[in-house]
Image (cartoon, rainbow, N blue to C red):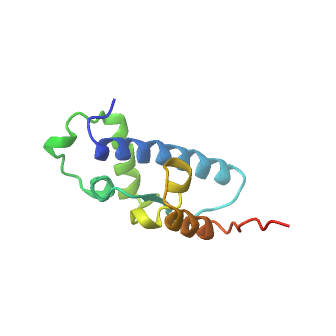
Amino acid sequence: MSLSITEAEYKASAHAAQECVWLRRLIEDLQESIDDPVPIHGDNLNAVMLTSNPVFHARTKYIELEHHFIREKVLDGIIDMVDVRSEDNTADIFTKPLLKGPFEDLRSNLGLIQKTSL
């Protein structure tokens, strides 16, 4: 159980990094090379900053060591943590209720069009 939003976002990013590493290895097994780091987008600036900051903060002392896997992969250049503003976070359309304007903006970002009635 996470004690803060930052901790929850950091743990989620660590799990995403594990999946990215697994997929990179699969692609490399298929004789394809990946030269660029895989971007992982996060909308919690503290969690994004924590991935590249080697100093442990008092608020993160309860994060288990396994979740710091992402920090190692960021420092190795395999993962690139990217901060995304909340209003630009396309995943929000799937995870939270939105007002009509933000919903339509995110729907547009996904390339979805509104159905027209006949």
Q: Say which residue appears at 19% left-offset and 37% top-offset.
A: 61
- Say which of 118 and 12 sits in front: 118
Residue 80: x and y, percent? 43, 62
Farthest residue to the top: give it.
1
Quadrant position of residue 22: top right
Horizontal arrangement in the rendering, residue 72 relative to residue 20 (left or right): left
- Say which of 23 and 106 sits in front: 106
Task: Say above or below: 40 vs 2.
Answer: below
Quadrant that contains the N terminus: top left
Horizontal arrangement in the rendering, residue 54 relative to residue 71 (left or right): left
Farthest residue to the right: give it.
118
User: How many labels sit on residues?
Assistant: 0
Task: Say above or below: 11 vs 51.
Answer: above
Horizontal arrangement in the rendering, residue 86 relative to residue 46 (left or right): right
- Say which of 47 and 52 sits in front: 47
Farthest residue to the front: give it.
118
Q: Say which residue appears at 42% left-offset and 48% top-offset.
A: 13
Quadrant that contains the C terminus: bottom right
- Say which of 34 and 97 sits in front: 97
Residue 90: x and y, percent? 53, 61
Q: Say which residue appears at 37% left-offset and 46% top-offset.
A: 9
Task: Say above or below: 14 vs 46.
Answer: above
Task: Say above or below: 41 vs 6.
Answer: below
Residue 104: x and y, percent? 58, 67
User: Residue 29: in sight, yes or no?
Assistant: yes
Q: Say which residue appears at 47% left-offset and 48% top-offset.
A: 17
User: Residue 35: in sight, yes or no?
Assistant: no
Residue 105: x and y, percent? 55, 69
